[in-house]
Image (cartoon, rainbow, N blue to C red):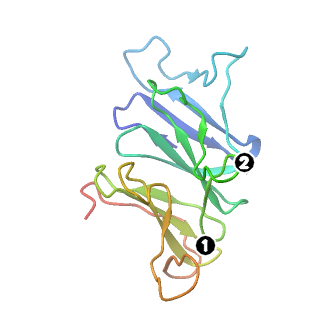
């Protein structure tokens, strides 16, 4: 579960039905503590469809995107959560060069994810227990490497994560990012 910086919405990963539920967490709202309809153009209360079994969720510091790990696909999906956006509650294509909506490829079996505070040089850190590494994703929308995995060891072929201990599953970042 991840809560937006303004405290108004919570996003919950539903692994078994490949979706993200949106909960109203604004105590002044008429729908407080209720699941919100992520797609009001269809009947019923819909969640956000996410391919490949979402596992963990993190909200960007500006509150405009969520990043969702997928254990089975070895990827991180990016979802637009900016209510003013035309892509609100839709999965963002992170690779416009392919004909399908792509997510960000990371290491083996990504689980936990945490995003640094602030928007300048923002990074998402993703633990990969399948490779015993942490992948670093550039989540700064003003960066030329936005939504790309940053290679931590350019001397070795392929995107290298940060090597850590055996079977990492969770990660946290301090509020000040230091």
Image location of residue 146, percent across then percent down: 44, 55
- Outermost residue, right direction? 17
Q: Position of residue 103 (x, y in %)?
A: 62, 53
Q: Which residue is mark 1?
A: 129
Q: Earlier in the sequence, mark 2 or mark 1?
A: 2
Q: Residue at x 37, y 15 (%)?
A: 28
Seen in the picture, residue 107 relative to 70 is either above or below; the reply is: below
What distance separates the C-alpha of mark 2 from that of mark 1? Answer: 30 Å
Crowding around mark 2 (Cα neighbors within 10 Å: few <14, some 14 to 19, many 20+) is few
* Residue closest to the eye, 125 or 10: 125
Residue 14 or 38: which is nearer the viewer?
Answer: 38
Q: Which residue is mark 2?
A: 99
User: On the rendered structure, is 169 left or right of 108?
Assistant: left
Q: Position of residue 36 (x, y in %)?
A: 57, 22
10 Å crowding of disc 1: few (<14), some (14-19), many (20+): many
> Residue at point 69% right, 53% down?
98
Task: Report the quarter where the C terminus lies.
Answer: bottom left
Q: Secondary structure at mark 2?
A: loop
Q: Does 10 appear above or below 103?
A: above
């Amino acid at each position: 579960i991840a809560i937006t910086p303004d405290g108004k919405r919570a996003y919950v990963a539903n692994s078994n039905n490949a979706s993200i539920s949106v909960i109203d967490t604004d105590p002044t709202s008429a729908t407080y503590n209720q699941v919100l309809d992520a797609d009001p153009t269809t009947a019923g209360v819909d969640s956000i469809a996410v391919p490949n079994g979402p596992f963990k969720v993190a909200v960007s510091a500006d509150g405009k995107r969520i990043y969702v790990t997928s254990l089975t696909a070895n990827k991180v999906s990016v979802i637009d959560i900016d209510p003013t956006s035309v892509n609100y509650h839709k999965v963002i294509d992170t690779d416009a060069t392919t004909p399908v909506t792509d997510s960000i490829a990371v290491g083996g079996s990504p689980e936990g994810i945490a995003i640094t505070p602030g928007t300048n040089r923002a990074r998402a850190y993703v633990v990969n227990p399948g490779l015993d590494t942490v992948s670093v994703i550039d989540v700064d929308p003003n960066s030329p490497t936005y939504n790309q995995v940053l290679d931590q060891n350019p001397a070795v072929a392929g995107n290298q994560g940060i090597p850590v201990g055996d079977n990492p599953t969770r990660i946290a970042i301090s509020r000040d990012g230091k």
